Amino acid sequence: MTESDMEILLSADENSGDVQKIIVPIDDEMDTVKSDSPNTVDELAMELATIKQSAKKIAIIGSRNLPITHQQMIETLSTALVMQGNTIITSGGSSGTNAAAIRGAMKANPDKLCVILPQTIGQQPSDVQDQLIGVPNIIEHSDRAMMTLADASRVCNREIIDECNQLICFLSHTSKTLHNAVQYAEEGHKVITVFYLD
């Protein structure tokens, strides 16, 4: 390594007055950006702008298998987000994350809740249908009536993410469908908050 490949920094010790010489290698490649690399500055700027928005569309999705304490936390979070002027987007669910998000948003302001179903209301279990009574903004998909619920749910998660500025997801490390949803949100440059339950 030659001196042209190094940057020499001098510093003085305040106590002894000794001057120390620090040699720092200069790597030209560190200062260049490859043409095929993503523009992370633009992505960060977009995320910062989303965070600063006073009212956002926030998707809340996650596991159905949650202890009651986690459900209460999600319900409280959903209520608080709506009270700040945000819109909550979620899917149907008789228990777990989605149900808690619906209950919380309905307490604060039903007009700030959008429920996107994987299929139709008629295809939901009766307890889900009961929970959706009074929800003013429900999007159904009769075109997915012949799909399995698992496939329809995957498509539904993507639709929810497409509609939001920010995703909040509650999942376990083994939740493949939800991990795929988070990855999809990352590809769409959404602001993401993930809570692992295990």
Image (cartoon, rainbow, N blue to C red):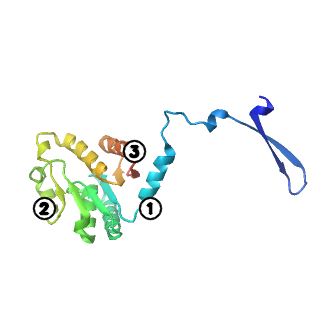
Using the image, determine if residue 84 lies above or below residue 150. below
Q: Which residue was labeled with disc 2?
A: 130
Q: Mark 2 to mark 3: distance in Å?
A: 34 Å
Percent x, y for residue 143?
12, 43
Q: Residues within 10 Å of mark 3 (few under 14, many from 20)?
A: some
Depth order, front residue of 106/86? 86
Q: Is residue 48 left or right of residue 74?
A: right
Q: Which label was assigned to residue 52? A: 1
Earlier in the chain: of badge 1 and badge 3, it is 1
Using the image, determine if residue 139 lies above or below residue 34. below
Given the current orientation, which residue lies at the most extreme top position?
1
Depth order, front residue of 72/160? 160
Depth order, front residue of 10/33? 33
- Residue mark closest to the camera, 2 vs 1: 1
Q: Secondary structure at mark 3?
A: helix
Percent x, y for residue 38?
48, 39
